[in-house]
Image (cartoon, helix red, strand yellow):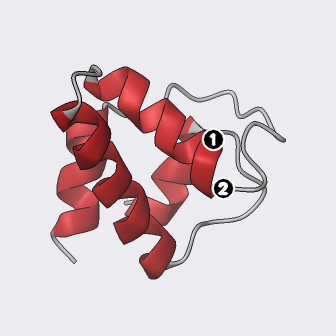
């Protein structure tokens, strides 16, 4: 089973898996943006674009996970 880093890499077209610290920062940014009124989908994408320098540098022929699933997986570690 893929870990949260793998799943974030696939969902946001990253070149490498984000570190645990980057994963936690992504989740924190998502929470902040959701609190500001953005949907989880918008917040996840905005957080990834802000945080990951390799955002959308790759395309993977796999459907990405939901933001709820990714947040749970990041927080459960």
Residue placed most toward the observer, 32 or 62: 32
Q: Residue 2 vs residue 11: left or right?
A: left
Q: In which quarter of the image is residue 56?
A: top right
Residue at x 53%, y 58% (from the top left corner): 6
The image shows residue 61 at horizontal and vertical percentages of 68, 27
What residue is shown with label 2? Answer: 52
- Whether 19 is drawn above or below 56: the answer is below
Q: Residue at x 15, y 70 (%)?
A: 76
Taking the image as shown, residue 62 lies to the left or right of residue 13, namely left
Q: Quadrant of residue 51?
A: bottom right
Asked if the residue at tag 2 contacts the one at tag 1, i.e. Cβ–Cβ closer than 8 Å, the answer is: yes
Residue 2 appears anywhere in the view:
no
**Closer to the camera, 2 or 16?**
16
**In this picture, residue 14 sits left or right of residue 74:** right
Give the image location of residue 18, x and y in percent. Answer: 58, 68
Residue at x 39% of width, y 61% of height: 4
Q: In which quarter of the image is the N terminus?
A: bottom left
Residue denoted by label 1: 49
For this orientation, the residue located farthest to the front is: 36
User: Alpha-carbon distance for marks 1 and 2?
Assistant: 6 Å
């Amino acid at each position: 089973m893929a870990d949260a880093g793998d799943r974030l890499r696939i969902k946001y077209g990253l070149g490498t898996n984000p570190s645990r610290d980057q994963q936690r920062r992504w989740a924190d940014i998502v929470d902040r943006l959701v609190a500001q009124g953005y949907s989880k989908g918008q917040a996840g994408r905005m957080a990834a674009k802000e945080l990951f320098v390799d955002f959308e540098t790759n395309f993977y022929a796999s459907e990405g996970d939901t933001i709820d699933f990714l947040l749970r997986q990041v927080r459960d570690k």
